[in-house]
Amino acid sequence: MKATKEFKGVKAGDIYPTEFKPGDEIPPELEAAALELGAAEHKKEPAKKT
């Protein structure tokens, strides 16, 4: 998941926040927070053919 707006978050194992800018990859542990802040959009998965 990539950031669509700037936001700060603390990655797992870090003690200081990282500033994520639009286009930066968001670590899995911060995806929910980024979505809640409106700093990322849900992943769009391709339709499966059956």
Image (spheres, rainbow, N blue to C red):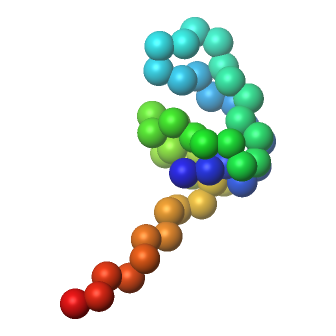
Residue 4 seen by the camera: yes
| Residue 37 visible here | no
Q: Write down the quadrant of residue 48 in the picture.
A: bottom left
- Residue at 76% from the left image edge and 48% from the top image edge: 22
Residue 45 sits in quarter:
bottom left
Residue for point 62% across, 28% down: 9
Residue 38 x %, y %:
66, 53
Q: Residue furthest front?
A: 49
Residue at 50% over, 63% down? 43
The answer to which quarter of the image holds residue 10 is top right
Say left or right for 6 vs 39: right
Residue placed most toward the observer, 37 or 10: 10
Q: Residue at x 43, y 77 (%)?
A: 46
Residue 27 on image: x %, y %: 51, 36
Outermost residue on the bottom side: it is 50
Tell me the quadrant of the picture where the C terminus can be found: bottom left
Asked if residue 24 lies left or right of residue 10, the reply is: right
